[in-house]
Image (cartoon, rainbow, N blue to C red):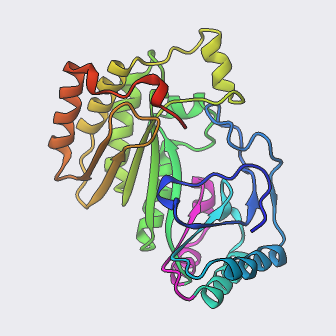
């Protein structure tokens, strides 16, 4: 129940109890992001985390989902994570799912046995920000992971019977690299075959290094119509053989898309193609937000 700094969580965790187990982001170098720039990364003491759970039980009569924050809580050793998960089961027996942010590096450090332990202790979903399938873009934004490493991490999560939710960002390559970004992201999703894909549209906060590049004209943002072209090309290159929930209905998006792949692919492509010809269906800039 005690938080250091601003707290962030995935949109799908809106009704979850947020439990801060780490503070900030261990990487904290992505050029498009300023979410954790006000924090120095550190681990919270286990006794404080467990005390927060006991405090929360006094406030909430029922908690169905719990999300472990901050930016890459999966960096914790399994011993500590399992202690937290055991206390969640004891104090909130009704909790049906625990979610957590993780980087590709975090996942790749875990053994299959460790991931199985987390799954057996209640972790039902791991959120990973892939952002792009292009190694060129990943390097430019200082992501700290390669395309191959991200694919390996997501496959490892899914193989452990944990759902993966992977985020990509439209417009992240600017006008110079949007085609590569679209194609490589689409083919990456095809190789990953995650349970969930979330597609946001680029917006940067004042503390993000990319904001300065935009202001100085070194990075050119895509127009709404160019975002539609990029999204269309990305979706055209997604070919999955297992169910994948696709969502592009974040507050940052110009056009809301919701569907299940592969069956809803053509319907969503039709929506995009209609929006390309009817710009009035796109969200006005002043309605967009992070």
Q: Does residue 137 belong to the magenta stretch?
A: no
- Residue 144 locus on image (x, y percent): 63, 42
State which quarter of the image contains the C terminus. Answer: top right
Q: Please provide the residue range marked out in magenta.
A: 93-120
Q: Is residue 205 left or right of residue 50?
A: left
51 above or below 11?
below
Residue 161 relative to residue 29: left or right? left
Answer with left or right where residue 51 lies relative to residue 57: right
> Which quarter of the picture shows residue 115?
bottom right
Report if residue 149 is visible in the image: no
Instruction: In the rendered view, tell whether residue 67 sits above or below residue 221.
Output: below
96 magenta-colored? yes
The quadrant in which residue 19 appears is bottom right
Residue at left offset 56%, top offset 89%:
93
Residue 120 rendering spot, x and y as whole percentages = 52, 84
Say which quarter of the image contains residue 111. bottom right
Between residue 60 and residue 241, name the one nearer to us: 60
Image quadrant occupied by the N terminus: bottom right
């Amino acid at each position: 129940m005690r938080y250091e700094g601003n707290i962030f969580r995935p949109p799908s965790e809106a009704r979850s109890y947020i439990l801060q187990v780490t503070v900030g982001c261990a990487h904290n170098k992505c050029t498009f992001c300023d979410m954790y720039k006000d924090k120095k990364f550190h681990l919270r003491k286990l006794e404080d985390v467990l005390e927060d759970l006991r405090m929360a039980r006094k406030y909430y009569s029922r908690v169905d989902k719990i999300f472990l924050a901050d930016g890459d809580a999966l960096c914790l050793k399994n011993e500590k994570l399992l202690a937290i998960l055991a206390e969640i089961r004891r104090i909130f027996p009704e909790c049906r799912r625990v979610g957590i942010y993780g980087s590709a590096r975090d996942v790749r450090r875990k053994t299959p046995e460790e991931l199985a332990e987390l799954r057996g202790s209640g972790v039902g979903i791991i959120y990973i920000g892939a952002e792009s399938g292009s190694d060129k873009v990943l390097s430019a934004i200082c992501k700290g992971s390669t395309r191959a490493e991200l694919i390996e991490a997501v496959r490892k999560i899914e193989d452990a019977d944990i759902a993966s939710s992977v985020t990509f960002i439209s417009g992240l390559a600017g006008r110079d690299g949007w085609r590569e970004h679209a194609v490589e992201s689409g083919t990456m999703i095809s190789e990953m075959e995650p349970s969930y894909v979330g597609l946001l549209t680029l917006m940067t906060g004042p503390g993000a290094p990319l904001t300065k590049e935009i202001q100085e004209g070194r990075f050119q943002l895509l127009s709404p119509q160019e975002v539609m072209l990029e999204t269309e090309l990305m979706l055209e290159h997604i070919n999955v053989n297992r169910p994948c929930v696709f969502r592009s209905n974040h507050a940052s998006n110009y056009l809301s898309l919701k569907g299940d792949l592969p069956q809803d692919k053509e319907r969503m492509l039709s929506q995009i193609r209609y929006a390309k010809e009817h710009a009035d269906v796109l969200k006005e800039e002043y309605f967009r937000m992070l």
